[in-house]
Every structure is written in structure tokens, then in C-alpha cells.
Image (cartoon, coloured by chain):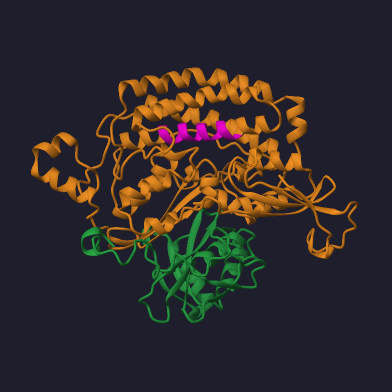
Chain colours: A orange, B green
Amino acid sequence: MTETAVAPKDTADLAQGEKVQYVNELTTLNLGPTHPATHGIFQNVLTMDGEKIVAGEQTVGYIHRAFEKIAERRPFYQITTLTDRMNYCSSPINNMGWHMTVEKLLSIEVPKRAQYIRVIMMELARIADHIVCNGILGVDTGAFTGFLYLYEKREDIYEIYEEVCGARLTTNMGRVGGMERDLSTTAIRKINDFLKTFPPVLKEFEKLFNRNRIFMDRTIGVGGISAERAMSYGFTGPNLRAAGVDYDVRVMSPYSSYEDFEFDIPVGQHGDTYDRYMVRNEEMWQSLRIIEQAMKNLPEGPYYADAPEFYLPPKKEVYRSMEALIYHFKIVMGEIEAPVGEVYHAVEGGNGELGFYLLSDGGRTPYRLHFRRPCFIYYQAYPEMCVGSTISDAIVTMSSLNVIAGELDA
Amino acid sequence: MLTNQSVAEEIIRKFGDDVFDFEEPFGMLTFSTTREQIIPMLDYLKAHPQFQVNFLTDIMAIHYPDRVGQEFCVVYHTHSFIHNFRIRIKVFLAEADVHIPTATGLFASANWMERETYDFFGILFDGHPNLKRILNMDEMDYFPMRKEYPLEDPTREDKIDALFGR
């Protein structure tokens, strides 16, 4: 972190055009690009009046990887690996969101069992995402213990991912048309174990933080945003709900059988850091509820749709039947053409509405694909949220916004 | 409950010939308008006592190099939280004149969405407070998402489109 003194040339353009008398000489502070408290690579150039932030500007794009351009040359199944590198804290949600977008374009109806498995995996991913966000928020306020306790359970979730798809972080889970394999008995046992062992840990975590005087002093009234401003800034997900707007894609436009489950949408009041923390905590409880219901009512039947042109045939079949071999080749070589159409599909990601706008001109690859990344859209509100506060408050605010660099920069 | 039909009729009544190409791909009301009408349109939809289209979901652009006079398309996805109703609005622009008014006066979120669109396609949003590159580096002198910039090295001969996709 470097600190350089600058003489303010014109004080009028700072702090929204009002003539302000600053107490001290203004200094510029570079928070980032590599700073432990930014949890990712992005820079904030803050203008400080003593300890107070009077203006801020973000620089993003440090890990921009041109996913939208790359996607224009890849067959649909190869784009899945791009999506899980966006919000890498909850990759399965990105993967499923992409599969569902393609399925919508191709009008594939996915069997109930696959939809339920997807819901289970997406909710586990949401819990993993919120564990990271709330755990790190604790670390940023000076409490490491909660983070450590919860991270053990995040490891359990990653073991479930391994059981379902073989990977941990960049999962590439599922296929267009369903899941790549059924839930194994080990996976079912691990999910059931998680459902039993996670609630006591989460309860303990809440006991550490919810009524902790230090934590409350650090977070209540810090980095607040009104519902109106949050809407204007395009907030979605837990951050918008903390401001008091009960918008949740899972309820507003249900996908993957979310309408079958009973769950509540926690809503905050003030939109400050403490509310965001509380909303995320409550969402973990609701996710547990959803997983419990899904596991209890897990339907029997196939775990993939009958879409031979897009779903890889089972390996056994490929060795035996000519037809399966042909489809296997055609899919792997990306020789299947998609119908013409434009489709927007949104899922509730860890941070809000994760949208995929897919434009197909009838070719093998998308003509244009755009990701609506919730992080990218709400992070622009950050200067407004921390003007007037101190550096330590600004760091807590950023932590509670859960800005994931991969999603921010695409 | 709003239906595509009723909303479209109301919009046509208000804007007349300035709205055209009505479609509903996968159920989302989609239409085109002119760049002179896009801001009044967003304003009208936002302030409309019944529609209350109060959320700007996304702004992005598409490049159609083969459509003469309509090379660029700026797409606005809007959403009414009250009625859970989505509208997609398109504005076509000619390559020679890629100016379009900014929506930052209506939605604060338009700021970065427009910067991103400028960054990748070079669409100029008139009146934008800070129209500069956002994800790419400032020294870049081209707009990478335009179709004339191929992802593969065009001089390669071992990878032809006929065999390996686009």
C-alpha cells in the first residue's frame, strides 16, 4: 500500500459537487490491487481527508479473461468450463445456469431427478459461497475462529462435489440435458452427513458473531445503502435483500423445480453490513431446508434427458452401438448445430441474479453470449457506500459485498 | 398480471411508429426502437403507473457486420419487480455513427454497463459521466468484441471453419 500526498486542485468535484472545507490536506490511498483485505485483485483509489474517505474510484479488469469472446468459438458444452471460473466460490450454480440456458434454447425437458440433484448441488454451492463471505467478514473484523470452524464444513461440501463430478473448485458439473452421473451412495451418505453436522457448526458460528458486541459495533450502520439506491445500482441477491427488497430469482421465476420447495426469503432493513451478514446466515438455514426437502423427495427415474444430440451417450454404449459412437464423435468434435434463437435465462447465484443472454444464429457456437455478472454491476456502488467512513469500515463493507474478482472481470 | 399483448399495445399507442419489430422469443417481450426514443422509452416504462419497470437488468451490444446501416445493436434488458415482467429493448446503430444517449440519468447501474459496452464495441454513450475503458487496459486501440477481430490466428491453415466450427 502506498500513500502519497496530493494537493487538491479543485475541491468542487469531490463529494458530489458541493464546496466542502476539508480539515486536512487530502491524500490519495491505493487500496489494492494486491491487498489482503480486497480478497481478489482490484484497486480502489481512495481520496482521504485525514481518516475519512471523501471520494473513491475503482479500477477493475485485472483478471479479465475475455470469456465472452472465447465463447464465440466454442461449442456449447465447452463453455461450461468458462462459467465456473467466474464465481469460483459457487461454481455449480454457474454451471447449472449455463446448462439451463442451453436447454431453454434447445427446448429440452430435464427429468425431475436431475432437476432435484441440481437443486441440491446449487444450494450446497450457495452455502459454500456464504461460508466464505461471512467467514471472511469475521476475519476482516478481527475474529479468525468462526472462519476456521466454518471452513471445515466447506471442505465437506467440496468432498460432495468431488463425489458428484470429480472436481472441487472449478467443477464443470452436469451436462446439457442433465447430470453426468447419478448420485452415488457415497454422495448421498455425505450429503446426509452434512445435513446432520452442519447445523450445530452454523449455530456455533452465529453464537460467536450475531450478538458479539465488537462485531456489532464494527458492522451495524456501516456501509449502508437504501433500497431505492440499491435498486438503482442494480443490486440483486443477498445485498439487495439486506436493503429490504424481497427479490429472489428462485421465487420470482422458478427454474429447476424450485417451485416444489418451501423456503423463506430473509430480508433485512437497513442494507448495512450487519444486515447483509444476517441475510446470508439465514439463507444458509433456508438452503439446508431446501436440501433436506430435495433429499427426502428425490424422485426416481433417469438423471438425464433424452437428447442424444447434446447429451454424451454412456461410455458402454459407445463401445457397442454405432449410433452412440456417431453421437459421441459429433458432440465431442462440436459438430452439432443449435437452432436459431435468443434466450435470456437467470439463476439466483451466490451474489444475485446471474444472467445468460445467448444469441444463436444456427451455428455450432453462440453468435453472442453475454453474462450478467451480479458482482460487476453492484460493485460500482462501492464508493458511494464508503464515502464518509474510515478505511477500516470500507474494508468491512467490501468484505460483506462479497465481490469475487473472477465474476467481476469475467 | 401484465401480458405481452397488453403492454405492447400500450407502448404502440404511446410511441407509434418509433417502436417496431415486436417479438416474444421464449416469452420475453422484445421490440426495437430508435436511439432518439430509447431514453424517453425507459423513462416512460419506469414512470408508468401500471408497468413500473423499475430495474435495469443489463445493457450489452451485438455486432452484425453484414447488416448494412444496422451494424450494431444495443440491447437493454429491463425488469419490473412489481409485476415480475421483463422487457427487452433493442436499438440498432450504423457503424458510421455509433452514438446513443446514456441511461445513467435513470439508472445508476447503467454507468458500468455502458462503459463495458463501450470497452468492447466502441458504442459512444452521449452524456456519460466517465466513458472510458473498464475491463481492458486504457492503451488498447481497438474494440475486441467486434467480429472483425477473430479469436484464432487467421493465417493458420490447419484449422478451417468448415471442419472446426465457426
Residue A97, horizontal then vertical, whole percent: 41, 46
Horizontally, is A382 left or right of A126 in the view?
right
What residue sits 39% from the left and 71% below the top?
A: B148
**x then y, percent, for residue A309:** 21, 49
**Main SS class of the magenta portion in the image:** helix
Q: Give, as a single range, the part of the protein colored magenta.
A: A120-133
Q: Quadrant of residue B116?
A: bottom right
Residue B110, compared with residue A353, is above or below; it is below
Q: Is residue A103 visible?
A: no
Task: Indicate whether residue A128 is drawn in magenta.
Answer: yes
* Residue pictured at 61% horizontal, 58% vertical: B109
**Residue A51 or residue B8, whichever sits in front:** A51
Q: Quadrant of residue B124?
A: bottom right
* A69 or B15: nearer the viewer: A69
Asked if the magenta segment contains residue B26, the reply would be no
Q: Nearer the viewer, residue B145 or A376?
A: B145
Task: Indicate left or right for A362 with A118 as reference.
Answer: left
Number of numbered tags placed on the structure image? 0
Is A163 situated above or below B25? above
The N terminus of chain A - image quarter: top right
Q: Let me know if residue A15 appears in the view.
A: yes
Q: Position of residue A202 (x, y in %)?
A: 58, 23
Q: Is residue A308 above or below residue A158?
A: below
User: Is A284 left or right of A27, judged from the image as shown?
Assistant: left
Q: Position of residue A13 (x, y in %)?
A: 79, 64
